[in-house]
Amino acid sequence: MDQQKRLQALSDEYQSLQTELSTLVTARQKLESQQQENRGVQKEFAGLKDDEANIYKLVGPVLLKQDSTEAKSTVEGRLEYIDKEIKRIESSIKEMQSKSDGKRMEIMQIQTQAQQAPASG
């Protein structure tokens, strides 16, 4: 494969990695937003006195009364899940960044070689 075709292939791979990286970052941001929302709910729960707490859950257009222990447990479960997902996505982001950096270095090497090679013509 000549240098120009190799460079184009690497460039396409690099662009694909950047797109995947962007998707992962967006997913992480969404999870962080959900995490903040659930932490806010958790703080509200912490401020309630159990005996006087009425907790309602929105199901479609209806508010349904929910047991406070169950509600707290649900929020804690969501936070655990979100924390695990954020860690998983951050790991994927690091891996994608590493791959992306590798492709960028390959591209730079080929460009440097092309600049140093005598012009054929």
Image (cartoon, rainbow, N blue to C red):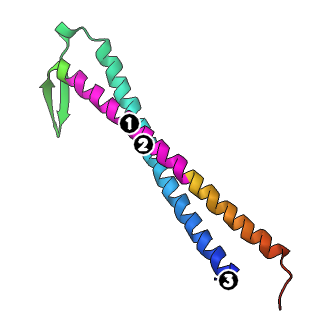
Q: Is residue 103 magenta?
A: no
The residue under the point 38% across, 36% down is: 84
> Label 1, label 3: how many angstroms apart (C-alpha)?
45 Å
Instruction: Say whether marks 2 and 1 touch (CB < 8 Å).
Output: yes
Left or right of 19 in this view: 3:
right
> The C terminus lies in which quarter of the figure?
bottom right
Instruction: Say whether marks 3 and 2 touch (CB < 8 Å).
Output: no
Highlighted range, magenta: 71-96
On the image, numbered disc 1 is attached to which residue?
84
Whether residue 25 is situated above or below residue 36 in the rendered picture: below
In percent of width and height, residue 87 lies at: 44, 38
> The N terminus lies in which quarter of the figure?
bottom right
Is residue 72 or residue 98 the one in the foreground?
98
Q: How many marks?
A: 3
In percent of width and height, residue 100 lies at: 59, 57
Residue type at numbered disc 2: Arg
Residue type at numbered disc 3: Asp
On the image, numbered disc 3 is attached to which residue?
2
The residue under the point 78% across, 75% down is: 114
> Label 2, label 1: how many angstroms apart (C-alpha)?
6 Å
